[in-house]
Image: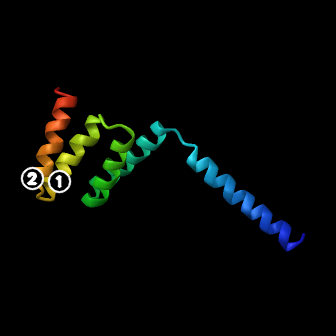
Amino acid sequence: MSRGLQAWKVLFLVTLVLAVGCARSPEAKKARHLERGDKYAAREQYKEAIIEYRNVLRYDQANARAMRQLGLLHYQLGEIAQAYRYLLKAEELAPD
């Protein structure tokens, strides 16, 4: 098999993998970010968890769980003003 043909096969596979990765639904992406945020928070990697929960809000601005988690994480980091803002919004979204 020629090198040119091998290169095209590799390029095709890379393109296919990228296309499949980009084809995930917004709900699947949101769930993935929530899961990753939960894992980071459990390991006390608060800044990484904050990034993941903010990514959730890119797909669902009214996600009470992400808002609540962001509030709690900012509180853990001593960022009281940001914590208050997120916790207040979480309470508005899910009063129970």
> Residue 15 in the image: x percent, y percent?
68, 56
**Residue 74, labelled with which disc?**
1
> Residue 51 in the image: x percent, y percent?
32, 55
Q: Is residue 44 visible?
A: no
What colour scheme governs how the chains and residues are painted in the rendered image of this protein? Answer: rainbow
- When the figure is inspected, residue 73 is found, relative to residue 62, above or below; the finding is below
Element on which disc 1 rests: helix
Q: Quadrant of the N terminus?
A: bottom right
User: Which residue corresponds to the image point at 18% horizontal and 46% vertical from the top-left?
Assistant: 71
Decide if residue 57 is on the left or right side of residue 1.
left
Decide if residue 6 is on the left or right side of residue 40.
right
Element on which disc 2 rests: helix
What amino acid is found at the position of numbered circle 1 in the picture?
A: His
Q: Which residue is mark 2?
A: 80
Q: Quadrant of residue 17?
A: bottom right
Q: Tag 2: Cα neighbours inside 10 Å, few (<14), some, or many (≥20)?
A: some
User: Which residue corresponds to the image point at 18% horizontal and 43% vertical from the top-left?
Assistant: 86
